[in-house]
Image: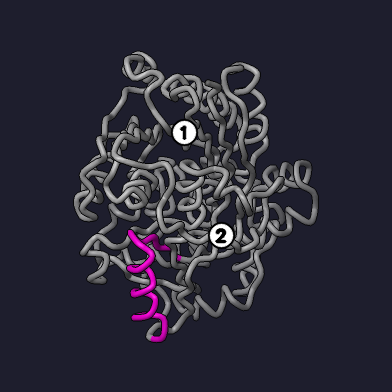
Amino acid sequence: MNLTRTQLEAFDRFWTALHADRRRLDGLLASQSPNVKSWLAEIAPLILLRPVSLAEALGIGVQPGEPWSIPPEKRGEWKVARLLADRLADSDRPRLIRDSEPLEEDFPPELIQEWKQAWGEKTTAELVRELGSPAPRSLRFRTVDERDAFHAAYAEQLPFPLKLSAISPLGVRAEGYLEITRAPEYEEGQIEIQDEGSQRMSFFALYPELFSPGLQERPGAVSESAPAAPSKWPDLDSRSRLVDACAGAGGKSLAWAAIGRNRGRIFAYDVADKKLQALRRRAKRAGWTNIQVLALPEGQERDKLASFDSSADRVLVDAPCSGWGVLRRNPDTKWGDMGEPLLRLENLQARLLAAYAPLVRPGGILTFGVCTFRKEETTDQVVRFLSEHSEFSPIAGGYLGPGPTDGFFMQAFRRKP
């Protein structure tokens, strides 16, 4: 059954607000009334992800260049979106996605042009395919035993594949929607929802030599070969001091706590106190007591942390970025302004690296990470950092994904003794 008039009007309000206010998709969905939230959460991300290829598959005409020829602030008026919402509501959406292919036209032309200039036609085609397809749901477990027990209990019961990750030694990938928050294992703190690539960055930040295999010189599908979790994670004990500089809701801090089994001290910093409150709740659910969180005013990191200089064994700066590697999870990102904000992000990344690098002790490791493959925010940022910080030398780094993980770049540096 197609959407009712009331539902279409609700979609119109949602679509207009998404573009007029530039609110994030997840936040706007969370604010919707219960009677429309569920179908909006199914339909809106698909329209944002594949606006042109889905219209073509559903027999809806699209003017050449649309929606990208429409100014970002006016895209909320794109009439094709309502037609897509109406027909998607009455379609077999999994089959529709499975039987159609994403197109270059599903992405802004300036994005496609930059990808081709930076990486060539072949890699661009791979990026379109991976970032135009819905993302799987990936889980991280506290231990290998808990992961294996969960997989054994559920793999045969689900109507879609549930695979042990070959990218993260504590991960599982679900190739369909999995309402994991209702599982007893989640309530007991065994499970966190975290992309396999993000998990891999967590491990890489602690042990770059061990987890650098599989990183690549250019973005693209990664060879699914990760080292098994060692019987004893090396060089991590009660004296270890680990800093998660841009912690957000704390996925990587929680992974570190799992690796160390509550040993050592983890310091999670971010400018968003609301996200850190979520980290506190998640740590409590998992039983971790060694994570200390602190909200730092933006621009004051150096002033607030100077007394801790040269004290950390590991520092991870998982910096804000363009998010090109996670467009399949955050498809609303590509609908905004692609210009000046990117330059601001480059400068912010450099400032954060300069602010947190002094925390690393001599012989310790600093890791820079971003969920993008844009050269100005990845390899160019590494060159910039090394030119300004001769006290560090590069260890290992490269791109991971997108495919089957989200897309990441990570680079580790060692502070010279």
Above/below status of 273 relative to 13: above
The residue identified by callout 2 is 226
Q: Nearer the viewer, residue 409 or 45?
A: 409
Please report the bounds of the magenta region as a residue range.
137-156
List x then y, in percent, for residue 73.
Answer: 51, 40
Let me know if residue 138 is in the magenta part: yes
Above/below status of 285 relative to 185: above
List x then y, in percent, for residue 390.
Answer: 61, 17
The residue identified by callout 1 is 317
Q: Residue at x 51, y 77 (%)?
A: 94
Q: Which is closer to the viewer, label 2 or label 1?
A: 2
Q: Quadrant of the N terminus?
A: bottom left
Determine the CA span between mark 2 and mark 1. Answer: 23 Å
Q: Nearer the viewer, residue 284 or 211?
A: 211
Q: What's the residue type where badge 1 is placed?
A: Val
Badge 2 element: loop
- Mark 1 crowdedness (10 Å alpha carbons): few <14, some 14-19, many ≥20: many
Q: Residue at x 56, y 35 (%)?
A: 412
List x then y, in percent, for residue 185.
Answer: 26, 68
